[in-house]
Structure formats: C-alpha cells, structure tokens
Image (cartoon, helix red, strand yellow):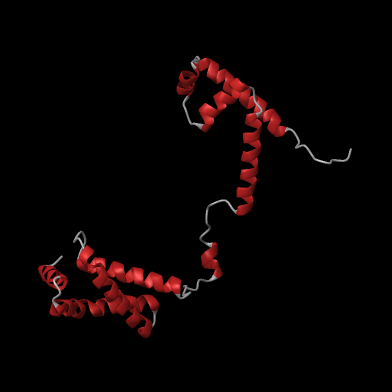
Amino acid sequence: MSAGDHILISAALRGDLGAATGLVDQYYQPIYGFLRRLCGNETEASDLTQKTFSRLWKALPGFAGKSTFTSWLHGIAHHVYLDWLRGNGHTEARPDHWWEERPDGRPGPDRQALEADLNATLYAAVETLEADLRETVHLHYYQGLTLEETAQALNLATSTVKYRLRNAIQALQGRMLEPPNRLNAQP
C-alpha cells in the first residue's frame, strides 16, 4: 500500500471527510471503468460504482493491509458486480456450442441413480453374509482399514483376513449376478 493511501485510509477511519473524498477522487474513475467494461452499460456502471464505495465505507475498518488497497477495492467492486448479475437475472448469453464444449464431467442423473441402486443392492447383499465375513468387509472396505489393521482389530492373522475377503467377494459376486426377485411374477 502506498504511503498516500495509508494516510488517506487512516484519516478516513478517524472520520476525516476530506480524506474520504480524496479516496473517492483517486479511485472513482478506475472502479467505474472496471465496472463499465464488465456490465457494458454506463448507467449500471455508475450505480455499481456507488454501491462499491458504499460497501467500502462499511468494510474499511476491516481492511488489514494484507493486499494493496486498490486490489482490495477492486475485489469489492467485483463482488458488487456479481451480486448485480445474480440479483437482477443478468447473465451473459452464451451460444450453444460454448456450453457443449464445457461438459460437466460429473455423472448425469441417470448414472447417479444407477450407481445408487447398485450400491444399495451391494450393501444389502453384504448384510446377508455370514457374520465373520460381514465384519471383515465392514472393517476393510467400509471403514477403510488396511489388511493388517483389519487383522489386528479382529485379532486374526492377515492371511485369514485375506481368505475371508476372498470368500466374501465370491459370495457377493454370485448374489449380484443373480436375477432380481420379481414380486408378483407370473410363471
């Protein structure tokens, strides 16, 4: 932060109206220009600039000087702009091809539903395992314990844990490959 900014900020915090006016005089045009480029409208940019300085006076006592005053003030202006975009339904129009080039990457609702159904089926199948296999699966897969940690928790040899997990997996594979029970199915 420049020495001049520091002096103006300190004086403005003490209630010096001249210092507050000096900050506005120094930063009004850069903030207005920034907001004018973002919103594309002189009237809106003027209103947003006023809102920025209004927020500045409320936030100024919290300015810690960890960044430059100008970057901090531009951050306030950017948040005012984002609030304006959200609050007034303003969005930037994008052509369809722009959206198509930016896939979400997350699974769609159909895939999420399929995975949820599969998980529910698998969890239900685990609950039908013999107690010793079920406990081993719970500790190793659900709780994320290593083979050694699972063996210690169950007071078993690691080889026994491996044997139980192999048996559990084989049993689960068999159950998962079975056709689902159909209620009210006609022969």
Residue 53: % across, % down: 27, 75
Q: Could you tell me how many numbered marks the image carries?
A: 0
In the rendered view, tell whether residue 97 sits above or below residue 46: above
For the C terminus, which image quadrant? top right
**Left or right, 79 with reference to 5:** right
Residue, x 54% and y 20% (percent of image)?
A: 162
Q: How far across and down, in percent of the image, does residue 32 sit?
A: 29, 79
Q: Quadrant of residue 129?
A: top right
Q: Position of residue 144 (x, y in %)?
A: 48, 31
Look at the image and tell me whether residue 174 can be seen: yes
Residue that extends furthest to the right in the rendered view of this protein: 187
Q: Is residue 166 visible?
A: no
Give the side of residue 143 with respect to residue 6, left or right.
Answer: right
The answer to which of 59 and 141 lies nearer the viewer is 59
Image quadrant where residue 72 sits? bottom left
As displayed, is residue 113 above or below residue 179? below
Query: Which x, y percent locates residue 65?
Result: 18, 61
Q: Nearer the viewer, residue 116 or 108?
A: 116
Q: Nearer the viewer, residue 106 or 15?
A: 15
- 36 sits left or right of 97 in the view: left
83 sits left or right of 25 in the view: right
* Residue at far front of view: 15
